[in-house]
Image (cartoon, grey):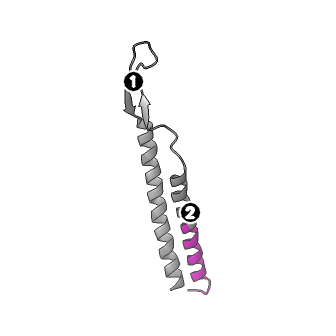
Amino acid sequence: MTDLTPAIIVTCGLLCDIFGAYLIAKNILKPFASPYMRDIGDSGTLNGGALIIENPDYKRDETSYLKSAKFGFYLLLFGFVLQGVGTW
C-alpha cells in the first residue's frame, strides 16, 4: 500500500456518502407525481356518483421511491464503512 491509498479509500467513501444522502433527500423531499386516490366514477353526470379507488400509478411511484431510498441508505452505510477502513 502506498501513502495515497487511505486517502483514496476515504475519498471514495465520502463520495458514496454524498450520493447516498442525495438519494435519500431527493426521495423524501420530492412529492409524488400522481394523486393517492383517483375517481373513476361518473361523477360529472347528472345522477352520477363518485367511485374512488387507489391510484395504481401512486403505488408504482411509491415503490420506485422506496427502492431508490433504500439503495441510498445502503450506499451511505457502505461509504461510512469505507471511511472507517481508510482511516484505520
Residue 76 position, x and y percent, is 49, 67
Q: Nearer the viewer, mark 2 or mark 1?
A: 1
In the orientation shown, which residue stands out farthest toward the front? 47
**Which label belongs to residue 83?**
none
| Residue at 47%, 37% in the rendered image | 35
What's the residue at 59%, 74% (across, down)?
11
Does the magenta stretch mainly form a helix, a strand or a loop? Answer: helix
Q: Earlier in the sequence, mark 2 or mark 1?
A: 2
Secondary structure beneath label 2: helix
Instruction: Quickly name the residue at label 1.
Output: 50
Which SS class for mark 1?
Answer: loop
Residue at left offset 53%, top offset 81%? 86
Residue type of the residue flagged with mark 2? Phe
Q: In the picture, residue 15 is in which quadrant?
A: bottom right
Say if the magenta span includes residue 68: no
Which segment did they paint magenta? Answer: 1-17
Q: Which mark is residue 19?
A: 2
Position above or below: 41 against 65: above
Residue 50 found in image quarter:
top left
Where residue 24 appears, x then y in whole percent?
51, 58
Real-space Cα separation, disc 2 to disc 1, in angstroms = 44 Å
Q: Residue furthest right?
A: 4
Q: Nearer the viewer, residue 18 or 46?
A: 46
